[in-house]
Image (tube, grey):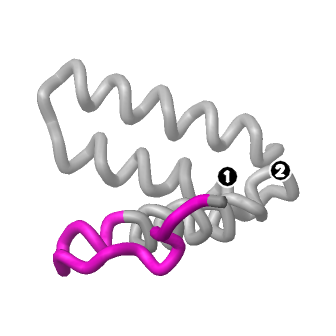
């Protein structure tokens, strides 16, 4: 059985659990689908993309949270 079919079954299982209001089952099926997706060549870049996104958010929000001016702030020209 291919990984794509397993991912599809995991997503369908998550939807069924969500419709039946079984939150734990939906979370487990979603995590299985995510792990299977990351194991595929198409999903191998996902952890790096998430890390880059979170790093960008961290760098942009830290000055606001610490009440410091960003290092790039200054007069233009």
In this rendered view, identify the residue nearer to me: 45 or 35.
Answer: 45
Labels 1 & 2 near each other (Cβ < 8 A):
yes
Mark 1 highlights which residue?
37
Q: Secondary structure at mark 1?
A: helix
The answer to which of marks 1 and 2 sits earlier in the sequence is 1
Q: Nearer the viewer, residue 19 or 41?
A: 41
**Residue, x 43% and y 62% (percent of image)?**
57
Foreground of the two, 2 or 46: 46
For label 2, the SS is: helix
Quick check: 70 left or right of 39? Answer: left
Residue 67, magenta (yes or no): yes
Q: Which residues are magenta?
A: 61-76
Q: Is residue 49 magenta?
A: no
- The disc at residue 59 is none
Q: Position of residue 17 (x, y in %)?
A: 27, 31
Q: 11 above or below 49?
A: above
């Amino acid at each position: 059985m291919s990984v794509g079919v397993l991912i599809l079954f995991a997503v369908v299982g998550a939807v069924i659990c969500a419709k039946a209001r079984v939150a734990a089952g939906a979370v487990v099926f979603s995590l299985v689908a995510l792990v299977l997706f990351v194991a595929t060549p198409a999903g191998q870049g996902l952890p790096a993309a998430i890390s880059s996104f979170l790093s960008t958010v961290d760098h942009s929000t830290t000055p606001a949270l610490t009440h410091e001016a960003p290092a790039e702030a200054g007069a233009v020209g």
